[in-house]
Amino acid sequence: MRILVVSDTHGDEYGLCQTILAQPKAEVVIHLGDGQQDLELQKARFPEKMFLQVRGNCDWGSSLPVMDERVFEGVRVFFTHGHIYRVKYGTYEFESAARDHKANVALYGHTHMPETCYRDGLYMMNPGSLHGSCGTYGIIDITPQGIVTNIIDRK
């Protein structure tokens, strides 16, 4: 199973659409906030995909949750925008919350800085910001052999 992870589209609906088209194997698209309306527009274009999203600090008036978790093929994925865990100042609070939720994979945005790492049984990923010509996004592949995370430059 492939999961496409995006964040901080900030109105770049075209870039989001192009990214979804570039990843046809992705069955699930997770948007980590700051682009609620951008994702709403894609749901009608790609009805075969599952779309999940959380509220970011710039999604004013949104009723979306600030965090969520789902299980895909036995892998628990915890995701949030990150501002409520103050990720711009470090990931300790976020990582602790993910571990409290018994996550295997923890996703966050907000900083616009792409990163993926593995620490003591937890994969953590920030896909960066998809906004603009230098945008980035993340891919999670869940296979019988394990989990693989990647950051991809949108060019």
Image (cartoon, rainbow, N blue to C red):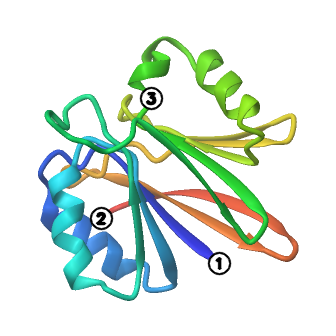
Vertical placement of residue 30 versus 19, above or below: above
| Corner quadrant of residue 146 | bottom right
Residue at left offset 15%, top offset 55%: 37
Q: Secondary structure at mark 3?
A: loop
Q: Are marks 2 and 1 in contact (CB under 8 Å)?
A: no
Residue that label 3 marks? 82
| Corner quadrant of residue 24 | bottom left
Q: Secondary structure at mark 2?
A: loop
Q: Nearer the viewer, residue 152 or 77?
A: 77
Q: Amino acid at mark 2?
A: Lys
In the displayed structure image, the side of residue 117 where residue 59 appears, left or right = left
Q: Amino acid at mark 1?
A: Met
Q: Position of residue 42 (x, y in %)?
A: 22, 73
Q: Amino acid at mark 3?
A: Gly
> Which of the marked residues, 3 or 1, is nearer the chain's N terminus?
1
> Which of the marked residues, 2 or 1, is nearer the chain's N terminus?
1
Q: Quadrant of the C terminus?
A: bottom left
**Alpha carbon distance from label 3 to label 1:** 25 Å
Whether residue 87 can be seen here: no
Front label number (2 vs 1): 1
Neighbour tally class for label 3: few under 14, some 14-19, many 20 plus, Cα within 10 Å: many
Q: Are marks 3 and 2 in contact (CB under 8 Å)?
A: no
Q: Which mark is residue 155?
A: 2
Neighbour tally class for label 2: few under 14, some 14-19, many 20 plus, Cα within 10 Å: few
Residue at left offset 21%, top offset 83%: 45
Q: Nearer the viewer, residue 1 or 99?
A: 99
Residue that label 1 marks? 1
Q: Position of residue 83 (x, y in %)?
A: 39, 23
Residue at left offset 22%, top offset 51%: 36
